[in-house]
Amino acid sequence: MKNVKLLNGVEMPILGFGVYQIPDLEECERVVSEAIGVGYRLIDTAQIYRNEKAVGNAIKKSGVDRKEFFITTKVWITNSGYEKAKTSIEESLKKLQTDYIDLLLIHQPFGDYYGTYRAMEEYYKAGKLRAIGVSNFYPDRFIDIAHFFEIKPMVNQVETHVFNQQIIPQGIMKEYGTQIESWGPFAEGKNNLFTNETLVEVGKKYNKTAAQVALRYLIQRDVVVIPKTVRKERMIQNFDIFNFELSETDMKEILKLDKKESLFLSHYETLKQLTI
Ligand SMILES: NC(=O)c1ccc[n+]([C@@H]2O[C@H](COP(=O)([O-])OP(=O)(O)OC[C@H]3O[C@@H](n4cnc5c(N)ncnc54)[C@H](OP(=O)(O)O)[C@@H]3O)[C@@H](O)[C@H]2O)c1
């Protein structure tokens, strides 16, 4: 596994496993256990996914040393603000059955997220969070946090896939030393990503699927990826991306797929989709 080094020197795997939309706890525990068996060590959950307990169970039962894992969770908007965020971090620690979280993110830049960030700085200094960061912070909000807080966000997790490549935002994050992390590396299959002609054609050269090419493209651009699947054969497939390298010509072809806009939601339009 290749790692990236965060601002504070902490190492983070460049490939992880996401557990969004697996609300059933038994199913989630089964899926995470299988992913651990395949070799995944970065597990990405969130308070709002309501499956932190299942992630904690799978990790505990795996028999793998806790130090080998990189657990990410996120503070939801209804837990924003200094006091509420602290209470929610305690709850996350309990559900995940761990003394520390490897990476804690603010899930969305809504509510009193300044208060949330202050709470996170405190927990970071106390050693209960190994790294802190944000998610879905578009450049304006990202710069605000990165510029004015003592501890810079180490990660910004944003929608990133071949159709929305985040080239300019990634450059801005880099100026502050912040690592970009992709959510939805397959765009959840939108735009027929898995049968996209460019990705399929490039893949044929290396005997790889469109999904593997989509992930490989992102990691070659130093983007951390956390694909989700409930199927073991796909876990194996998505993990098998370190034994080939896309050429410069392939990279340029895939760059052309970039539409530079979200396939999901825009903060400039509505908050409705966030009131889960
Ligand atoms: N910060 C945020 O606001 C935010 C938002 C969204 C997601 N996330 C994080 O990012 C993770 C990944 O994003 P995502 O779950 O939204 O979507 P995604 O990883 O882009 O796509 C998941 C979809 O692709 C399918 N799939 C996976 N591997 C495949 C393969 N090799 N071939 C064909 N189909 C495949 C899965 O189906 P099956 O499961 O049926 O295999 C599922 O329908 C999430 O799980 C979550 O941890 C964060």
Image (cartoon, helix red, strand yellow):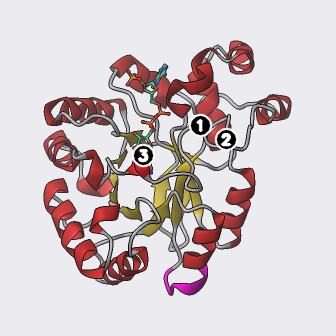
Q: Is residue 13 inside the magenta stretch?
A: no
Q: Is residue 3 visible?
A: no
Residue stretch in magenta: 147-151
**Which corner quadrant of the image does residue 113 belong to?**
bottom left
| Mark seen at residue 263 | 1
Depth check, front residue: 41 or 159: 159
Q: Residues within 10 Å of mark 1 (few under 14, many from 20)?
A: some
| Mark seen at residue 273 | 3
Q: Main secondary structure of the magenta part?
A: loop
Residue 45 shown left or right of residue 186 in the figure: left
Q: Amino acid at mark 3?
A: Gln
Upstream in sequence: badge 3 or badge 2: 2
- Per the image, the residue denoted by label 2 is 164
> CA separation, marks 1 and 3?
13 Å
Q: Which secondary structure lies at badge 1?
A: loop
Residue 168 shown left or right of residue 90 in the figure: right
Q: State if disc 1 and disc 2 touch (CB < 8 Å).
A: yes
Q: Amino acid at mark 1?
A: Leu
| Mark seen at residue 178 | none
Image point (64%, 69%), residue name: 140
> Which one is in front in this view, the residue at disc 3 or the one at disc 2?
3
On the rendering, which quadrant does ligand 1 occupy? Answer: top left
Q: Is mark 1 within 8 Å of ligand 1?
A: no
Q: Give x and y (percent) for residue 27.
A: 19, 29
Upstream in sequence: badge 2 or badge 1: 2
Depth check, front residue: 36 or 155: 155
Q: Residues within 10 Å of mark 2 (few under 14, many from 20)?
A: some
Residue 62 shown left or right of residue 269 in the figure: left
Q: Which secondary structure lies at badge 2?
A: loop
> CA separation, marks 2 and 1?
8 Å
Q: Amino acid at mark 2?
A: Asn
